[in-house]
């Protein structure tokens, strides 16, 4: 049976949050999303920039595009990956710690 301390749980949660954001929103991973979604920007009635996402293709391509364009959907899969890697490859803990710190910083930054 796996044992998770409270601090490890917080690190896993924040790392999953940041990993999900990295996959769904960050420009650096747009190359991963490009075959599955098309994004465009336009101004709304208030003059604010709004991003439109169009899912490409059919079948598995459309399914993957649906996951990559949905924070909630991708978050589930990213959390599964983080937890499995955390338990089966503990040497990767520093990567999760870095993701957790970046996730906490993002939360703090969004509240300021």
Image (cartoon, grey):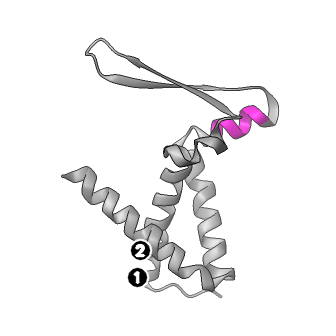
- State the residue in front, 24 or 30: 30
31 above or below 110? above
Q: Main secondary structure of the magenta part?
A: helix
Please provide the residue range marked out in magenta.
61-67
Proximity of marks 1 and 2: CB atoms separated by less than 8 Å:
yes
Q: Is residue 104 magenta?
A: no
- Label 1 Cα crowd, 10 Å radius (few <14 / some 14-19 / many 20+): few
99 above or below 31? below
Q: Furthest-left residue in view? A: 112
Q: Furthest-top residue in view? A: 45
Q: Residue at x 69, y 81 (%)?
A: 88
- How many marks do you count on the picture? 2
- State the residue in front, 44 or 78: 44
- In percent of width and height, residue 76 lies at 59, 55
Q: CA distance from mark 1 to mark 2?
A: 5 Å
- In percent of width and height, residue 44 lies at 34, 15
- State the residue in front, 26 or 6: 26
Q: Which residue is mark 2?
A: 10
Q: Secondary structure at mark 2?
A: helix
Instruction: Kindly indicate the quadrant of the structure image that contains residue 62.
Output: top right
**Quarter containing the N terminus:** bottom right
Q: Which residue is mark 1?
A: 7
């Amino acid at each position: 049976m796996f044992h998770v301390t409270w601090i490890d749980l917080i690190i896993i949660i924040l790392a999953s949050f940041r990993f999900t954001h990295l996959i769904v929103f960050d420009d650096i991973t747009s190359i991963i999303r490009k075959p599955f979604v098309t994004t465009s920007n336009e101004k709304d009635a208030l003059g604010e920039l709004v991003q439109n996402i169009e899912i490409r293709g059919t079948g598995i391509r459309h399914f993957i595009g649906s996951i990559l364009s949905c924070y909630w959907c991708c978050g589930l899969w990213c959390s599964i990956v983080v937890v499995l890697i955390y338990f089966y490859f503990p040497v990767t803990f520093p990567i999760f710690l870095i993701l957790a710190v970046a996730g906490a910083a993002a939360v703090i930054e969004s509240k300021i």
